[in-house]
Image (cartoon, rainbow, N blue to C red):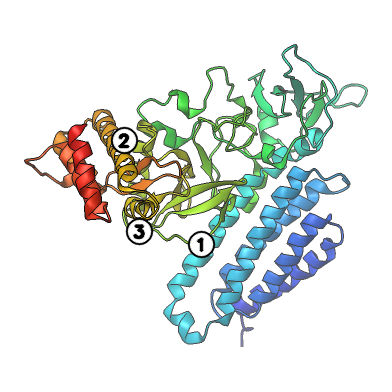
Amino acid sequence: MPPTKPSSTTSQALNAAIVASTLAKEIGDLFPPAAAAAGVLLLILNTIKHLKTDQIECYRLAQRCLELLTQIKEQTEGRSDVPSSLTKNLEKFERTLECIHTQMKTFTERSWKSRLMKKGDIERSIEDLNALLDETATSFQIATLINIHYAIGDRTPMASLSSEGSSSTLVNFSSRQGTSSSGQSVPQSVLVGSIDERGLLIETRDSALSTDLNASPIGGSFDVLSDIDSRPVTPHDYGFQRTQSPIDSIGPDSSDSHDGSSSDEDDSLSDVMEDPFVDSVSSTRAPSMDALTVKDPLETESGAPAPAWREYHQSDIVLQGRSKIKDGWWGGSSEVSVYGRTVIVKRYVGDHSKKLWYRDLEILKTIQHRHLPTLVGFSTEDSSTRFILLAETGTKALRIFLRDESKQRDISTMSTVLLQLYQETLEVAHYVQEQLNLSDSKTQDYIEQASFRVTTDQQILLGLPSTELDDTISCRQWTLKESIRDVFIAALPDKCLEDSFLAMVNAS
């Protein structure tokens, strides 16, 4: 009788036990931030043992987490100094593991009937967790940048290299290929980068990279040719930015001043980003970056909002509460925190989410107006849930704003406020009509169906046109001004306000 083939579940359980034992042995060698992440991973492995379904897929997810943790250990082994920037990245990884552990616990708490009925939901949850881990691994880029963390860390400013107060530090990336007669390594290829006054790598001076450097980005050595004259580097300085993403081509001109790219910028660093470390922990290859820019993703050096639109990962976003907006273009949007700044996230879900996401991005990149949503950033194209980030927070629906204000102001003051909002709406309506080349009828379709909100400084803010209007043909016997007037009349809480408002509109 042939020997019985061991079951897949038994084999996976044995592998999990081996993984857990190995991990437990190595935790003691890790520095505290990584040890905390390893502890959460042990909890995940212990939870998986009690799963009744989808155990294999959960083991594979845990194995990918372990591979990432192993890479961290290898890159930090023998080093006692830990930059705050690296600690921040490890804390993000720990939060990702905690999210995975929480989801695994919900799997174990379900009855067999619930697991059977919601098997599809469980599989989708595992896919989402894999995607979240992909994004965390991509944000690390640890194999390429770990030496930069230690090379420029949180150093104290020493010397100025520019009469204007800015400084430049040259970093020589040399591959370890070949040796001299004295036995010392001889660089076979050199990439010289410039570090600006904030201690950030901003450009390259030599675009001639050999394939040896591309094949071994981790094995390179770093020669700091001058000291850094800058403020202490913060964790935010190590975020990644794609200066020109594939989605930038949606706009009318990919070289537009708002795309954040520079004609002087050298994209030769894209070769360095071919990172075997990311390949080992990510099931899908991260797109190569045109350039590596490490800076605060939401602000320029002067502190003003950055003009570029950037890609963000779900792991960059911290929710601050559930959305209370149900209808209209703003429906489902909610306030979130991104690198300490509060913004609005609008998600796109459903059968046509990709089409809607592309459409809104195209409009927001094509037209910018103070009474239209301000685009801050957007998700990666391969994100499991696509989203955009908007600058306007604390807004109120037009009807609610007028109701609240009417309780505090007299009719004369309210009429003045209404007239201002009316004129702002007329202004933005003409702007949208001109920029999108809309007919009078289409512009009225947009205004009559738009989602009106009011900002904290009492300015009108319109959502984007609905896709339902694309296939609508309508004709009217009234003008655009009358359409706007009717929108405000419908939102008024008091008949007395209507009479006063109409009088001021007719007189204007």
Residue 449 image point, x, y percent: 23, 49
Q: CA distance from mark 1 to mark 2?
A: 45 Å
**Mark 1 or 2, nearer chain start:** 1
Foreground: 151 or 372? 372
Q: Residue at x 17, y 46 (%)?
A: 471
Quarter of the image for the C terminus: give it: top left
The quarter of the image holding the N terminus is bottom right
Q: Position of residue 183 (x, y in %)?
A: 91, 26
**Camera-nearest residue between 418 and 283:** 418
- Look at the picture and state if 5 lies above or below 383: below
Horizontal side of 154 relative to 373 (left or right) equals right
Q: Disc number at residue 350?
A: 3
Q: What secondary structure is found at the residue carrying circle 1?
A: helix
Side of 348 where 152 appears, left or right = right
Residue lying farthest to the top in this orientation: 163
Q: The residue tagged with tag 2: helix, strand or loop?
A: helix
CA separation, marks 1 and 3?
Answer: 16 Å
Q: What amino acid is at disc 2?
A: Glu
Lower position in the chain sequence, tag 1 or tag 3: 1
Determine which of the numbered discs, if any, sits on residue 127 in the image. Answer: 1
What residue is disc 2 on? 424
- The disc label shown at residue 74, or none: none
